[in-house]
Each structure stands twice: as C-alpha cells, then as structure tokens.
Image (cartoon, rainbow, N blue to C red):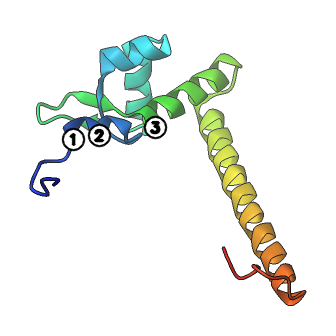
Amino acid sequence: MADDTAPADPLRRLDDPDFPALTMSQAAELLGVRAAFLRSLDSSGVLQPHRSTGGHRRYSRSQLGLAARLRGLLDDGHSLASAELIVGLQDQLTAAHEHLDRLRSDVSRLRQRAAGKPGADTP
C-alpha cells in the first residue's frame, strides 16, 4: 500500500522549465556567454532572473531559452530593442498558429458531428 503522507520527490522541481535552478555562472557557461551578457539582459529589463535569498541571480530553463534566442539575434546584428521585439512577435505568431490549429480541430469535429458520423462526440 502506498504511503500518502510521503513527501513529493524534491527533484521533480528540476522538470519544471520555470524553476530557477542555475546560478549565473552555470547559465553563462551553458549559453557560451559571459556573465556580463546576462547582467546586461537583467539591467535592461529584457530578462529578469529570480533572486535567491542572498540576492544572487538564478535562472530557469525558460529564461535560458529566451537568452539564447536573444543572443542569436544580437549576433545577427540586431539591437537589443529589435531582438526583444522580434522574439515577442515570434511568440505571438506561435500562439496564433496553436490557436488556429485548435480552431481547425474544433471545426472538423463539428463537421463530423453535423454529418452524423458515429464517435464524433468524443474529444
């Protein structure tokens, strides 16, 4: 019988892309950048890392993904402001495509239901 009072696995937090698991030096090493690059993203407000109780920056996988995308655009010659705008527009476009896919699925399901096909009511 399973023990319902057993604490949850603390390592599961590492699966959360928003869990701030990495120090600045770890993040910089993973991205292949200097810590100053991450500090500049923080000071500009583009990327706001979590802070430990001691005030040290902590980065999540999601934040590292954003930093990598920005770095790629900066390396291509974009300014930080245009890189931030491009990333925002890319994210909006991705969300719009996902929404469109859901709408198409809904329309297909409704058409099947209207045609009286069996099993059309199942999601």
Q: Which mark is residue 12?
A: 2
The answer to which of marks 2 and 3 sits earlier in the sequence is 2
Residue 26 place in picture, x, y as percent: 34, 16
User: How many residues crowd around disc 3 within 10 Å: few (fewer than 14), some, or many (20 or more)?
Assistant: some
Distance from Cα at disc 2 to Cα at disc 1: 6 Å
Please say if 79 is above or below 75.
below
Q: Which mark is residue 9?
A: 1
Q: Amino acid at mark 3?
A: Ser
Asked if the residue at tag 3 contacts the one at tag 2, i.e. Cβ–Cβ closer than 8 Å, the answer is: no
Asked if the residue at tag 1 contacts the one at tag 2, i.e. Cβ–Cβ closer than 8 Å, the answer is: yes
Q: Residue at x 20, y 39 (%)?
A: 10
Q: Amino acid at mark 1?
A: Asp
Q: Residue at x 40, y 15 (%)?
A: 28
Front residue of 103 and 68: 103
Apparent side of residue 12 relative to residue 30 in the rendered image (left or right): left
Asked if the residue at tag 1 contacts the one at tag 3, i.e. Cβ–Cβ closer than 8 Å, the answer is: no
Q: Residue at x 70, y 64 (%)?
A: 99
Q: Amino acid at mark 2?
A: Arg
Distance from Cα at disc 2 to Cα at disc 3: 16 Å
Helix, strand or loop under label 3 = helix
Helix, strand or loop under label 2 = helix
Please say if 76 is above or below 43.
above
Residue 55 place in picture, x, y as percent: 17, 32
Which residue of the protein is positioned furthest toward the front in this rendering? 1
Which corner quadrant holds the C terminus? Answer: bottom right
Residue 63 place in picture, x, y as percent: 44, 35
Front residue of 59 and 101: 101
Query: In the picture, residue 86 is in which quadrant?
Result: top right
Which residue corresponds to mark 3? Answer: 62
